[in-house]
Amino acid sequence: MTTHLFTPTTLGALQLRNRIVMAPMTRSRAAAEGMSTDIMVDYYRQRASAGLIISEGIAPSADGLGYCRTPGIYTEAQVAAWRAVTDAVHEEGGSMVAQIMHVGRVGNVLNKPAGSETVAPSAIRAKGDMYTDQQGMQPFDEPRALTLDEIPAVVEDYRNATVNAFAAGFDGVELHCTSGYLPAQFLSTGTNKRTDDYGGSPENRVRFVLEVLQAMCSVSGAGRVGMRICPDNPFNNLHDDDPQQTFDYLLERVARMDLAYLHVIRFPNGRVQNLELGRRYMADRLIGNESFDFEEAENAVAAGELTAVSFGRPFIANPDLVERWQQGLTLATFDLATLYTPGAEGYSTYLRATESQ
């Protein structure tokens, strides 16, 4: 009997040797100045048997950083450091895309490089706090609203990040368009109070995302570009009055771009049926995410409901997740206390099943 999750597939220009995708996960192991590190090389190499690895969120600019110990891809040194990661993944036969993540208003000055700013579509502070190494939990910054003539430069940051990602050896790029970060802030009525061409109507609120995607696609074609969404996700104090209308308008236009894939996080408590929405517009290149187990994922792919499924938490403690599922082995559990701590412990120290026997 065919196990569909273990069969190869193609997403645009991306070749996947199986349909088990490693989801992007912030793990806070980068060094100063947004640099990826040797333990990140080990971590991603260990998980290269995934059909596709989607990196943790990588900032396209210094302004795009907001959390402690997260990486960027806007300097030559950062590009060189990421090259060590992608080389390691490719040496193991894997494929990897860079998730480009600008946090917008979701940041704190203690986590940002000197001279950078916290910017957003509108000057509305997000409710809540975030962790800083220096002073523990601190409130989100009050953002500065981007001026109309500054927006093209931010779009250009995404294009440059895409250029740099390919220079660093990534096979593709993914636009992070959820979790309350900058693209989602432009989309949502609760965070976008602009009265110019980037605010108000759905047509205006989706403009920034479409321009960013077009810029990213201009580098090496749409077949190497994906997008991740989770309509109606309230994370980081996000709210939209009508997410169904917003995302119907967005995806109808995105579907014309012929992207490599659409990566959709399901959200059972939301007002939008997210996976159904994704199937409506990009059914032939849809990656599903959020709390799938092996059986549910296998059934979804076998039924043609999803092209592939991404897994986050199972990959944390199981670098050999694909092999464990192939062999019917029990999965290890991860240590919650070391999810975001510095250093290798609880990051690249998890063993393969063959090593733990």
Image (tube, grey):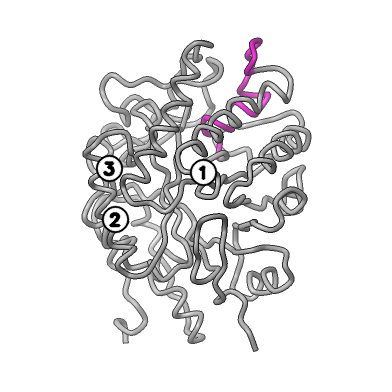
Which residue, given by chain and number where applicable, does mark 2 sit on?
A: 85
- In three-dimensional space, the C-alpha distance between marks 1 and 2, rounded to whole angstroms, equals 23 Å
Which residue, given by chain and number where applicable, does mark 3 sit on?
A: 79
The stretch in magenta equals 179-198
Task: Kindly tell me whether residue 115 is visible in this rendering.
Answer: yes
Mark 3 or mark 1: whose residue is earlier in sequence:
3
Q: Is-magenta flag for residue 196? A: yes
Residue 290 % position (x, y): 60, 57
Task: Kindly tell me whether residue 66 is visible in this rendering.
Answer: no
The dot on residue 221 is 1
Position above or below: 198 against 210: above
Residue type at mark 1 is Gly
Classify mark 2: helix, strand or loop.
helix
Instruction: Give the crowd class for mark 1: few <14, some 14-19, many >=20 residues within 10 Å.
Output: some
CB-based contact (under 8 Å), mark 2 and mark 3: no
| Residue at 51% across, 21% down | 120
* Mark 3 or mark 1, whichever is nearer to me: 1
In the foreground, 34 or 197: 197
Q: Is-magenta flag for residue 221? A: no
Position above or below: 268 against 147: below
Residue type at mark 2 is Val
- In three-dimensional space, the C-alpha distance between marks 3 and 1, rounded to whole angstroms, equals 20 Å
Classify mark 3: helix, strand or loop.
helix
